[in-house]
Image: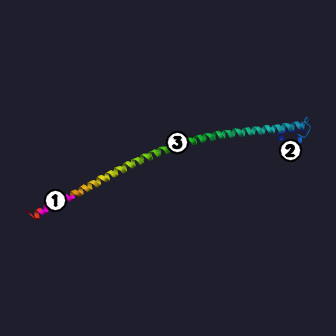
Amino acid sequence: MAIDPVDLDLKDIAEALNHPEGGERYQKAKAAFTYRQMKGQIETFEQQQIAIEVQREATGVQKAAIAVQKEALNVQKAAAAAEAKAADASIIGAKAAERNAKYMLASVIVAAIAAVFSAVATGLSLWGVVHPR
């Protein structure tokens, strides 16, 4: 009775390993057991290779993500610098507006004084016309 080591299931292998070591059944069971071990090792090795490749790809993706984050950080820095410049420009504009308001107030005061003098002059002229000397 010929036994193909590949076709043996675990129960048959375990049973055959209980036979004498020199027997054909034992040797075929041992061969089947060794074959299964090697097949399992090969499958494990192949899975490890796939896992390593996946890790390599994940590392590449992480590197790309880090590069994008660095670029985003640089953009945020540039935006912050632009905001600071805009704030400085706003402060300068506010100071200029304050200065212009002061000049405008001064010119309104001068115009009011001129209007008062003009009214006094008109009043004196009118007085001179109404009350000649």
Question: Can you identify the residue that label 2 sits on?
Answer: 11
User: What residue lies at 82% left-to-right and 37% top-to-bottom?
Assistant: 34
Which amino acid is tagged 2? Lys
| Residue that protrudes farthest toward the bottom in the picture | 130
Q: Which residue is drawn at 66% across and 39% down?
A: 53
Residue drawn 29% across the image and 52% down it: 103
Q: How far apart are marks 3 and 2 (CA)?
A: 62 Å
Q: How crowded is mark 3: few (under 14 residues within 10 Å), some or many (20 or more)?
A: few
Q: What is the secondary structure assignment of the residue under circle 3?
A: helix
* Magenta highlight range: 115-127
Rendered image quadrant of residue 130: bottom left
The main secondary structure of the magenta stretch is helix
Horizontally, is 105 left or right of 44 in the view?
left
- Residue tagged by mark 1? 121
Query: Which residue appears farthest toward the left when viewing the image?
Result: 133
C-alpha separation, residue under disc 1 versus residue under disc 2: 131 Å
Dot placed on the residue nearer the N-terminal end, 3 or 1: 3
The mark that comes first in sequence, 3 or 2, is 2
